[in-house]
Amino acid sequence: MMQKTTDSTSTWKGSNVEAQEPIEVYDAAGDLHSYIVNLTSNSQPAGFIEIANNSGDFPVLSFGEQSNRMTAADIESITNLAQTKHKEKNKASEKVVVYGTGKFALKVDYSDGSADLATPDNIEVISAEKNIPKAKEPKQKNNESKEIWGEIKKLATGEIGTTSDGVTDSLAFEQGWSSGNGFSYGTVGDANQYYSSLWSGPSGCAPTSAYNVFYWWHYTKGKSSLLKNSSGYVDKDATVLLLRQKMGTDTRGWTLISAQTSGM
């Protein structure tokens, strides 16, 4: 999202980019190092993002905006290439390993203890004597990366799943149902997000939803001051404005999850 917003030359700009299932990446010590998240746009490869495995590293270790990395097809092709070269060996296991910044290889281990470190362009043979994990390197203290991870954990609710923000998630849980057990409140407000001269940007999903809840308490439960302005009149804009202020909603209409309950 940041790249799409800040880089006018980004190939992701204006595209509806979707994330694929993460692929585990291991280091030379045999420990989980990161995850490759391949991206597609209109079912076509749109690059990748490599996400760190722990807060001692910055969240994004590498990324590319063009081709995918280590897809299932890549892994199958590299495996076939390695096994064609070593028909006499029996494969014991395989895993994706980090091969440099933004570079990955497939490590194919054989039952005789040897291994291949294979990419689409090259196969490096590792003898059984040298095929041993390297010593685990201690993580350096990185307060800056921990701060960034902390910000990620405070993700704001925002617009998801539209062509305007280019980020989609699965809303299948909201679709395909035919019946359910439950009940509804007919007097809850039905306001949608909207714009007003009192603030910049959309009203925001959290303040607007809160207004609808307040509407029910105001008209149904006798809390008849909830929607009134300082002059004593029901004022939708003033109510939403105050909710936005109390929740810290920004000009995009985004609100931190942790601020919604306290704001109400």
Image (cartoon, rainbow, N blue to C red):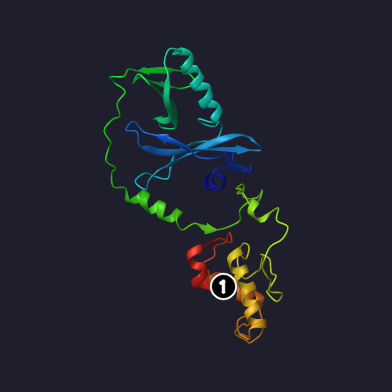
Establish if 4 lies above or below 72. below
User: Position of 113 compared to 167: left or right?
Assistant: left
Expressed as whole percent of the image width and height from the top left, the position of residue 76 reads 53, 24
Quarter occupied by the C terminus: bottom right
Position above or below: 220 against 98: below
From the viewer's side, name the closer residue of 259 and 188: 188
Q: In which quarter of the image is residue 33?
A: top left
11 and 214: which one is in front?
A: 214
Q: Foreground: 161 or 132? A: 132
Q: What element carries label 1?
A: helix
Q: Which residue is drawn at 36% across and 51% down?
A: 146
Disc 1: which residue: 243
As shown in the figure, which amino acid type bears the numbered disc 1? Leu
Residue 112, visible in the rendered structure: yes
Residue at left offset 51%, top offset 72%: 263
Q: Mark 1, residues whose alpha carbon is within 10 Å: few (<14), some, or many (≥20)?
A: many
Q: Residue at x 70, y 76 (%)?
A: 187
x%, y% of residue 37? 51, 39
Can I make out residue 107 in this image?
no
Image: 116 above or below 240: above
Left or right, 123 with respect to 133, comes to right
Q: Where is residue 251 in the image (x, y as percent from the top left)?
A: 57, 61
Q: In this view, does 263 lie above or below 15?
A: below
Q: How many marks?
A: 1
Coordinates of residue 218 in the picture (x, y in percent): 64, 82
